[in-house]
Image (cartoon, helix red, strand yellow):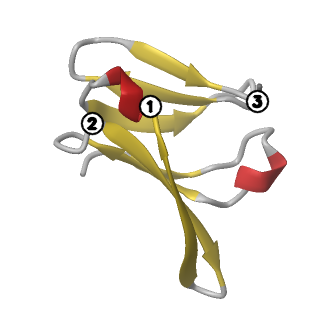
Amino acid sequence: MSGIAFYTGNIDEWKNNLMIGCLSGQKIIRLVIKDNKVVGEEWLLEDKNDRIRDVLNGNDGNLYAVSDSGKLYKISKK
């Protein structure tokens, strides 16, 4: 595990979800939390096969991830 952040961006269904960057898992894990319990999980960027070093909220409402290979990923609403 590496970077971690609560999502504060513009994707309503992700608000206050916990985003966890994974180095060995090579993905971002999105945890849905209700009443202090994890009630859902989604894996993001797992198809990139890249070690995710950090995740952070951008001022533009998007989620950003930085990888060990130096790539910057922007995760936004489709």
Q: Are marks 1 and 3 in contact (CB under 8 Å)?
A: no
Q: Are marks 2 and 3 in contact (CB under 8 Å)?
A: no
Of the numbered discs in the image, which one, if any, rests on residue 77?
Answer: 3
Q: Is residue 34 above or below residue 50?
A: below
State the image coordinates of residue 65 (x, y, percent, origin top left): 44, 28
Q: Are marks 1 and 2 in contact (CB under 8 Å)?
A: yes
User: Which residue is the site of mark 2?
Assistant: 26
Q: Is residue 4 above or below residue 75?
A: below
Tag 2, which secondary structure? loop
Tag 3, which secondary structure? loop
- Who's the residue at 26% across and 46% down the image? 2
User: Which residue is the site of mark 1?
Assistant: 45
Compute the Cα span from label 2 to label 3.
Answer: 21 Å
Quarter that holds the C terminus:
top right
- Work out whether mark 1 precedes mark 2 in sequence or the reverse, and give the earlier one: 2
- Name the residue nearer the viewer: 52 or 57: 52
Q: Is residue 32 above or below residue 73?
A: below
- Name the residue nearer the viewer: 62 or 49: 49
Residue ranking furthest to the front: 47
State the image coordinates of residue 16 (x, y, percent, origin top left): 67, 60
- Who's the residue at 16% across and 42% down the image? 24
Amino acid on which the number 2 mark rests in the picture: Gln
Q: Is residue 9 above or below residue 6?
A: above
Compute the Cα span from label 1 to label 2.
Answer: 8 Å
- Who's the residue at 53% across and 27% down the image? 64
State the image coordinates of residue 57 (x, y, percent, origin top left): 60, 36
